[in-house]
Image (cartoon, grey):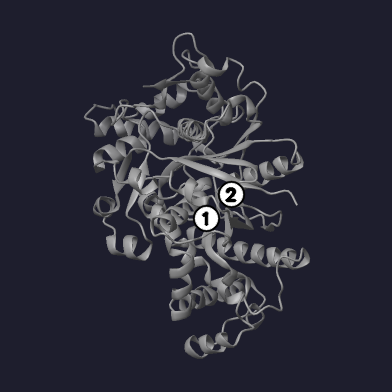
Amino acid sequence: MVSVGIDDVAIHFPRLYFDMEDFAKLRGADFGKLNRGLGLAAMAIPDVHEDTATMGANAVRRLIDRNGMDPTTIGRIYLGTESALDGSKPTATYIMDMLEQRYTPAHGKDCFRNCDVVDLTFACIGAVDAMHNTLDWVARGGEDKDRVGIVVFADNAKYDIGSSGEYTQGAGGGAILIRHNPRLLEIPDIWGVSTMPVHDFFKPRREVDTRTIVENVLDLARESGEKVKEGLAERILQHLPRSSKKDDVMFENPTLQIHKDTPVFDGQYSNRCYSESVKQAFINFRIKAIREGRYDPESDEILTEQWSRIIVHLPYAFQGKRMFPDVFRHDRRHLPMWEGIVSEIGPEPFSENFPDTPDGLEEFEKANDSYRRLISKTAEFKQFVDERIEKTTRASSLIGNQYTGSIFLALMSSMESDYIENVDMTGEKLGLCGYGSGAKAKVFEGEVQPQWREIASRFHLFERLSSRHPINKTIYEALHRGSRKRSVVKPSDEFALVAIGGDGQLEGQREYCWVE
């Protein structure tokens, strides 16, 4: 069999962070609930010169330099993101533009000309999809065709100010080196998949009434001390159907279509979709693993006990231990130990015991949510979390949600923690569970390779996190609204966004450069 997998991983995160205790004070929230309940300590916040493309490019640059790579040998750069910068032009091309600037002097202006790039979008699972695709591409080349691919993840997990998702914000980018005979993690070609078309979290094109826009602008003018005459809104609306002299925008319709970076979401429903999707993907993985002869269902050791670490998508640090009780339950129902859990917390609810109606379904979901919480409080599950999940949450607590990169941040967090604590992980198996709203989950497995220590020792993840710059509430909200125009921390030794549009440029054209 061809051995392919993750050879190395690099990550870039903003130098700015907003402390969760300061956030709690700003919003009048319970810091104890956010910190001890959800595992949140800080959120990474992009500076003025940072965006999806710069975070991705900075991570790829770190990966290339660390491994002494020749850009001409990189066959593809596939980006997973749900924070794309354009509705047509792939954000991956902006990343390539920056990389060409950086590496042309040493490798020639066409050093990335034959590299295949594209964006893949499926909410938070886009980077897992990009990696799945790239693993297949590398494997298809065979042992004699030394194909090398880079998977990039980059996102700004941004929510509306004051929304119920604001505390889960975060940002960052990363790059994953995929090749034959990997030094970090070999990934077998067995993937459990669960897909269902739901509306738990999405970013639609929205329609806004033009009257609302005009009235909001006038309200802002009043708040800033401007005098606004009565009836001005009506007079403006009467003139709007005529073409604007500035940019020929027509206001013939009563509404305008806009797109926002922030999502529409139902948090409670999304949690249920996450839990159900991961469980079904796990079941599908187990079936395929048995069929491929990689797992013996008659063995004494159940599948999740064979995984020394369980790496999942973390929209907030403790999401894994909150959602994994479903898989824990499914994997242990047939064991004698489960009888002890049932005697402690009572029998589990089953959908067939509830009316087959919308109200009955809602009643079952609430009962199942409650039972999941009861499982999470048992000594058996707490031990499971401490041994297999806890290390994956450490970096997430300090960064927040990275959308497509959250699962890979969890992987780096776990492996660097094991390296620091001198745990021998060679030959151990990891279970990985990606999730994207909309909704899809993928479960796959990784086997830790003999050279893993060499790779993990170069992450310096927690060291770099300790040297970031804190910001106050005023700067946080100015960055969030986009009203701040000057970087909080001057860019240094990194790619930076320097202009959008301007003289001699097309509308919206983005310009980047390397800043020494």
Q: Is residue 172 left or right of residue 115?
A: left
Q: Residue furthest bottom?
A: 343
Q: Is residue 358 above or below residue 266?
A: below
**Cα distance between the residues tagged 2 and 1:** 8 Å
Q: Quadrant where the C terminus lies?
A: top left
The disc at residue 238 is none
The disc at residue 125 is 2
Depth check: give the residue in front, 48 or 93.
93
Q: Secondary structure at mark 2?
A: loop
Q: Residue furthest left?
A: 225
Identity of the amino acid at label 1?
His
The answer to whether the residue labelled 2 contacts the one labelled 1, judged by CB atoms less than 8 Å apart, is: yes
Q: Secondary structure at mark 1?
A: loop
Mark 2, other Cα within 10 Å: few <14 / some 14–19 / many ≥20: many
Mark 1, other Cα within 10 Å: few <14 / some 14–19 / many ≥20: many
- Residue 164 visible to an observer of this rendering: no
Identity of the amino acid at label 2?
Ile
Q: Position of residue 71 (x, y in %)?
A: 58, 26
